[in-house]
Structures are given as structure tokens and as C-alpha cells.
Image (tube, helix red, strand yellow):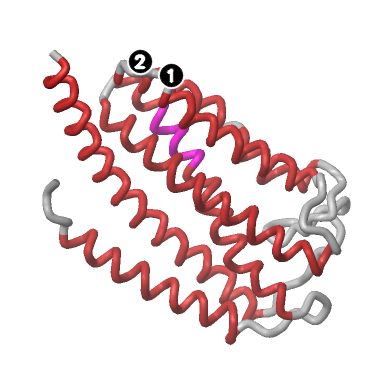
Amino acid sequence: MQPRPMMLKVLDIASIIVLAISTYLALFYAPTEAVMGQVQRVFYFHIGTAWVGLLGFVIAAIAGIAYLATKNMMWDKFEVAAVEVSTVFFFITIALGSIWARPAWNTWWTWDPRLTTAAVTELIYIAYFMLRQGIEDPEKRARFGAVYTLLGGISAPITFMVIRMFRTIHPVVVGTESAEAQGGFSMTGDMKVAFFFALFAFTVIFVDMLWHRIRLSSLEEKVEQLKLKVSL
């Protein structure tokens, strides 16, 4: 594998810095929420990871369309990288949400519309990797994967919009509040600083991890080609 590009090295360092700053803002800078107390601080990372998780699923769908249009395997690598990184981030989102829910709702999990669609979305993309593992031919695997991410990508906007469409206990904190949502809270100026910086920080981290995963895909492709040569 080629040495890391200078821009990637810079991005690695930037990711560590913005994560440290975001952690400080969430734990110390933002004021304690009046009703939920300290556990509300989970919110900043919960939303940050959810943002890049759903963003990555949409990007994967776009990459899938690009592959179907061009048959360029680079788009397949990009798609796999986006799904893999986003699946990890989205799992963290669900885990942090459960930590937040325990004191706020007195339960680790409830079949709230947002939680249900989030769980379904995570399972959809876990199944994506099972699908790819079952197909040996690279081009066929890429084609099936592209179609799958295109269909699976629909779950991302549904997960985002569901709390604006149905009655839910999940708060709406981005955009216009829903009359059906319960348990919401208003952010102070300091909370908004921590919130928006968390979105920025996790976007930087997402791009960094995506770039690393694409480079790993290139290495995996070379290993696969060597295996094919040996088997002939």
C-alpha cells in the first residue's frame, strides 16, 4: 500500500483535535440541562454520530447509482467504505440513545417510531455485508451491492423524518418542532455551540475514516487478485 498522502495525515491530526474540542464542549462548556441533568450531555455525540451515519448511507446510495451508471469499481469501493463506517457510527448512535433513554424514559429501549426505524436501518446495512459475503464474483457483487444500497438508502430519510410524521416521545431538536413530539427541550446559545461543533467534528472524523477505508479496499482488491492468480 502506498504511504499515506499528506492531506490524510493532516486529516488524522485534525480528527483528534476536533474530537477533543467537541468532548470538552459537551462535558464542560455546555450548561447542564434543567430537567434531564448530566445525562443530556450524551445528546451531542448521539446527534453527531447519527448525522454522519445517515449521511453515509445516503452517500453510499449515490455511489451505488454512480457504479450502475459507469461500472467503475472505484465507486464500489467508495460505497462499501461509506456503508461500513456509517454502520459503526449508527450503532454508536443507538447505544448512546439507550444510555440517554434509561434516566429520561426509565427504560433502555422502547418501540418508539424513531427507535424502531433506526433499528431497522442498522439491520438493513448489517445484512448488506452478509449479501456481499455470499457473492464471489466481484462485478456481480458490486452490482447487487449497488442496488441494495440504493433501496436501503430510502431508510435514512425515513428515519430522519419519522418523528415529524408520527406521534413519538423522541424530541425534535433540529428544525421545526413537531406538535406530536413529546419531551423536547430548547437549546441555549452555549448548547448550540456544542451541538453544531459536534456535527462538524464528526463530519471531519467521518471523512477521515472513509478515506482510510477506501485505501483498505484497494489493498483488499490486490489480495483478492493474488488469490485468483494462485487458484488458476
Q: CA distance from mark 1 to mark 2?
A: 6 Å
Quarter assignment of residue 214? top left
Quarter assignment of residue 45? bottom right
| Residue at figure coordinates x 39%, y 61% from the top left | 204
Q: Badge 2 local density, few (<14 within 10 Å), some, or many (20+)?
A: few
| Residue at figure coordinates x 57%, y 75% from the top left | 194
If the image is split into quadrants, where does the C terminus sit?
Answer: top left
x and y, in percent, of residue 230 in the image:
13, 21
Quarter assignment of residue 26? bottom right
What residue range appears in magenta? 57-64
On screen, residue 204 above or below 160: below
On screen, residue 141 above or below 164: above
| Foreground pick, 153 / 94 | 94
| Foreground pick, 32 / 69 | 32
x and y, in percent, of residue 9 in the image:
22, 64
Three-letter amino acid code at the position of disc 1: Phe
| Foreground pick, 219 / 17 | 219
- List the residue tagged with mark 1: 144
On screen, residue 227 above or below 39: above
Q: Badge 1 local density, few (<14 within 10 Å), some, or many (20+)?
A: some
- List the residue tagged with mark 2: 140
